[in-house]
Amino acid sequence: MAPGPAPGAVTPTSSDPSARSRAAVVAGSLTSSARSALSGPSGPALYCGMLGSALLTLGGFGAGALPVDGGPAAAVGLLGFTFGHGEVLALTLCWIGVALLFTAWLALGPRAVSGRLPTRDAVWATALWSLPSLPAMPMFSRDAWSYLAQGAMTAAGVDPYAVGPEANPGPFTDEVSPDWRSTATPYGPLHLLLMRIVVAVSGGHPAVGIVVLRVAVLVALAALTVVLVTAARRTGVDAGAAVWLACASPLSVIHLAGGLHNEIFPLVACLGAVVLALDGRRAWAGAAIGIAVAFKATAVIVAPFLLWIALTRRREDPSVTRPVVRALGDTALAAAIAVAVLGLATFASGTGIGWFDAIAVSDRVINYLSAPTAAAHLFHAVTDSPGFEDVLAVSRQVGRVVLAVVLVAVWWRHRRDRMTALRGIMLALLAFVVLNSLAWPWYYVWVAAFWMLARPGPRATTAAVGMTVFLVMAIGPNGSTSLYSPVLSGIAVLASLAVAWWWWRATGRVRTPSPERAG
């Protein structure tokens, strides 16, 4: 007869009373926290945003980035919701949802920038406005379908850096926009590895893959919230304001939770690297940068600023006699680990380093959100000269040169201490988004994540709020751009100016809390 457990031993089972007790405590704590937020001053705004998000999800079943079979609406016999008058109704629901989200977000804004919005309320705003999107179709972009197709290609042994999804016919490729079926992916090996896992978990069903991907994005958005709160507390910035602008913003709710863009994964890693660097954990900071770059090359912009954070720490340590040398050593260690992590990620994905060449495929996109592209359009319209492609090539090349100069200048000018380094990160990311050959609204989430950490003035934040309105209105729910419609572009500009004017009237005399007040 087998011996039983030793006296006093606890056999871990799913029915362990202590485990159930801990789960009950956590659930009770979350329920109490949500109840407090919803019953407090933020309650009306939280409910308004939840309704907006729900309407956006509902409208997305008819006007979102739908699969080729029509999606859930067609599956339940409501195919008419996806075209004609039904689509008009769906679009109306979507834009009402957007309007309600903005109303809710702006209602919390004055309290956020004055330091009176509890971090708890900002976090719940992010959660309650994002979770209704869990069953939604991809919104305001078809990129998520391309992501899944890239994962399917990787699983099938087809190189996504050499060919487009059309080289791997199947249900995932069928969902990719025809404009992108022949295009290689510009994303890093960890992106492909993650998408391969998502495709495997989906069992080969694209619709299931969207749900799995959305769960991953929502988890990453929660991680971004946690890391941002940590960063705010490390730097003496009000965490409620930081979360309000970066995570609860309609830009994040719509384009991350709704649009499922992979910006969220490298952004979490980059912000985590900054927090680790602030804590002096240089090796882990390097690993985080390596992970971020392995998702998307944009993350490399943040890396050089870690030198100034390391230098500040060394200067503040009275036992260090040569802070510059020690800081350079710290940075070299972090860089070596970042390269090692990037190499391991490349090896694990089995895709090689072809993505460095594939990054250039982004130049196929042409829209006014990129300053060099907008300048080419303006020059071509004013001069009425032939050969727009030639003008665009020149303007983009000039943009690259200017961007390189600006990035170096921003890096060097923000070397004084950790606070100026954080401002430099935000400005460098902003310069990249504006001067890059390609820009999409969701790229600005990078800037928003570092915005409050950079301690902007009221005028700058007013511009950011107005720009957020324009960016959300620049893309339609199905992913089509509104920028080439004079009417829609005009409406977006007028709406952003109106919101900026209201915001300035409501907060123009408010100053962001000092570190002492924020603490």
Image (cartoon, grey):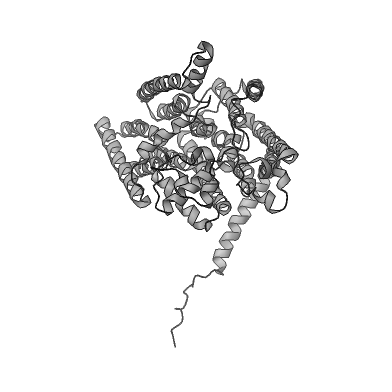
Numbered marks: total: 0
Q: Position of residue 394 (x, y in %)?
A: 41, 19
The answer, for residue 216, to whether it is visible in the render is no
Q: Quadrant of residue 413?
A: top left
Closer-to-camera residue (93/41): 93
Closer-to-camera residue (78/43): 78
Q: Position of residue 341 (x, y in %)?
A: 33, 46
Q: Residue at x 57, y 68 (%)?
A: 17
- The quadrant of the picture occupied by the N terminus is bottom left
Q: Residue at x 52, y 56 (%)?
A: 204
| Image height of 235 relative to 176, above or below | above
Left or right, residue 389 beside residue 177: left
Q: Residue at x 35, y 38 (%)?
A: 356
Closer-to-camera residue (431/501): 431
Left or right, residue 48 beside residue 342: right
| Image height of 264 relative to 23, above or below | above
Closer-to-camera residue (458/519): 458
Q: Position of residue 375 (x, y in %)?
A: 49, 18
